[in-house]
Amino acid sequence: MALAVKSSIKTLVKKRKMRISGDFWKALDERITWKVKRASDRAKANGRKTLRGADL
């Protein structure tokens, strides 16, 4: 599942004069999934149903 806007990331990477390997996208989706799960656990532990920037 693509969780990130690839075109925006590609633009950022190009500005930094870098390239993207094929395995980058899967690793990025896994990292985003992990971060969201962790943030939601933190919000729940604090009695909230809303994720905040501080949860990251």
Image: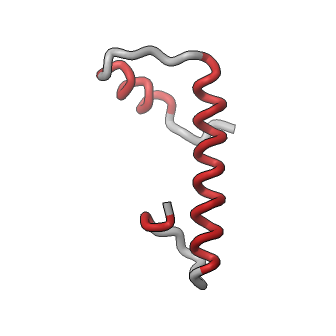
Q: Is residue 52 left or right of residue 14?
A: right
Q: Residue at the spot x=39%, y=24% of the render?
A: 13
Q: Where is residue 49? Give x, y as percent.
A: 59, 77
Left or right position of 13 against 44: left
Q: Quadrant of residue 10?
A: top left
45 vs 32: above or below? below
Query: Where residue 56 sits in the image (x, y, percent)?
Result: 49, 60
Q: Residue at x 63, y 79 (%)?
A: 45
Report the quarter where the N terminus lies.
top right
The number of callouts visible is 0
For residue 49, above or below residue 11: below
Query: What is the residue that sits farthest to the left in this orientation?
Result: 15
Taking the spot 60% from the left edge, 28% from the top edge, the residue there is 25
Q: How is the image coloured?
A: secondary structure
Question: Residue most toward the bottom?
Answer: 47
Percent across and percent down for residue 30 are 66, 40
The residue located at (39%, 16%) in the rendering is 18
Q: Position of residue 28 (x, y in %)?
A: 58, 35
Q: In the displayed orientation, state which residue is furthest to the right.
A: 1
Which residue is at the front of the view, 34 or 9?
Answer: 34
